[in-house]
Image: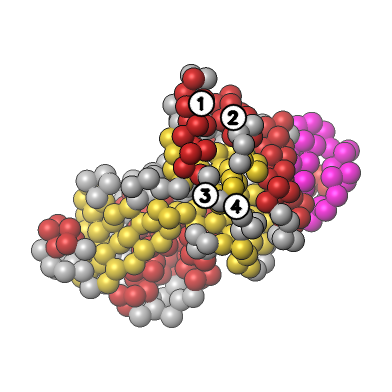
Amino acid sequence: MSDFQQIFGTAPKAEASAPGRVNLLGEHTDYSDGFVLPTAIPQHTTVGLGLSADALHHFYSEQLDEQVTVLESEETDRTPSGFASYIFGCVRILEREGYTIPHLNLYVTSSVPIGSGLSSSAALEVATLRGLRALLNLPLDDVQIAQMAQQAEIHYAGVQCGIMDQMASSLADTEHMLFLDTRTLESQVLPFPRGAEVVVIDSGAPRTLAASGYNERRADCEEAARLLGVKALRDITGVEAVGGLPEPLRRRARHVVSENNRVLEAVRGVPAERFGELMNASHASLRDDYEVSVPALDALVGILQETPGVFGARLTGAGFGGACVALVAQGKAGEMAKDVLERYSRAGYAGKLLVPAVS
Ligand code: ADP
Ligand code: MG
């Protein structure tokens, strides 16, 4: 990492990376203790770490071309804002666990698009924690790293996130899907359906309502679980059980229950065609029952679904904008994406291919 040297004047003492992720199936289920099925994407975040020469932390992001200096002591625990809050959060969470963390020079560089729903935030946290594990020889396993990363995002960046993003970044690779039970944190690495690969396209629609919509849906799920007398909607296994709920809770709960069942079917090793049908059904459920889609996402998913070589497609991430994921016949991704983006642009939108990564 020669750029570390340019910014900080010395070579880094440790370096670590972590990938972004895309969720194939199991959307809006993690805060109901449900099942998710993400995979890592080739884009990743790398951090270089060294010891600071003064009693301050210095964090630099190449993407933002921004350096933040953080004064940290027992008396003044002022959390920085912006990207530094994710890094500082990781430092603080480790300290709360009893580890002594020296003042750091930390350099961030990344190929994960920021704010597109591919979890650049989790990649930053997991890379930071891996970097600290390497620098200080910390006895942390990958699940602990994911949990600490989530705690950093919740308590220091102020984002009420589930555990999926951090578990995917910490445990998944690009060759497999990670089947994760978000209640027990048990996970299993599984092969993709045979003959299939993953395509991710950004819809170009900004995720303006994502934060408020996310909080509303979360509250709906908690209320539905309370009315049904269960700890979380994960405890409901059949959609019939939600029939007596008032609207819109009935449809919200029906999405979560049916989505969990789709993940459980997908991990039984179904062929790509069936996996694709489950993705299509997931999109319909997110659109009609969960109401987190927008016209741009529906248009992009519609074009994907009618394209030869595409097994299935759906919005991915929280919705209200952001990206779509598709499962396509292996080797077809490049030409298929070109065709889809042309048709999407004729429909009046501007999309962008995110995976496979174009370098
Ligand atoms: P997503 O995780 O979907 O990309 P988020 O809004 O959760 O979107 O996280 C994006 C935030 O994470 C950015 O606003 C920034 O604060 C931080 N971040 C992620 N990657 C970087 C990076 N390479 N440099 C600086 N900040 C980053
Ligand atoms: Mg994020």
**In 3D space, how far apart are the residues under numbered discs 1 and 2 (Cα atoms)?**
7 Å
Residue type marked 4:
Ala
Q: Is mark 3 within 8 Å of ligand 1?
A: no
Residue 195 image position (x, y, % from top left): 61, 55
**In 3D space, how far apart are the residues under numbered discs 2 and 3 (Cα atoms)?**
19 Å
Front: mark 1 or 4: 4
Instruction: Tell me: 252 left or right of 337.
Output: right
**Viewer-proximal residue among 287 and 224:** 287
When the figure is inspected, residue 211 is found, relative to residue 140, above or below; the finding is above
Q: Residues within 10 Å of mark 1 (few under 14, many from 20)?
A: many
Helix, strand or loop at mark 1: helix
Helix, strand or loop at mark 2: helix
Front: mark 4 or 2: 4
What residue does disc 3 label?
331
What residue does disc 1 label?
344
Q: Which residues are magenta?
A: 235-259
Instruction: Tell me: 71 left or right of 96.
Output: left
Front: mark 1 or 3: 3
**Viewer-proximal residue among 77 and 198:** 198
Q: Is residue 194 visible?
A: yes
**In 3D space, how far apart are the residues under numbered discs 4 and 3 (Cα atoms)?**
8 Å
Question: Residue 196 got which mark?
Answer: 4
The reply to whether callout 1 and callout 4 are in contact (CB within 8 Å) is no
Question: Residue 303 got which mark?
Answer: 2
Residue type marked 3:
Gly
The reply to whether callout 1 and callout 2 are in contact (CB within 8 Å) is yes
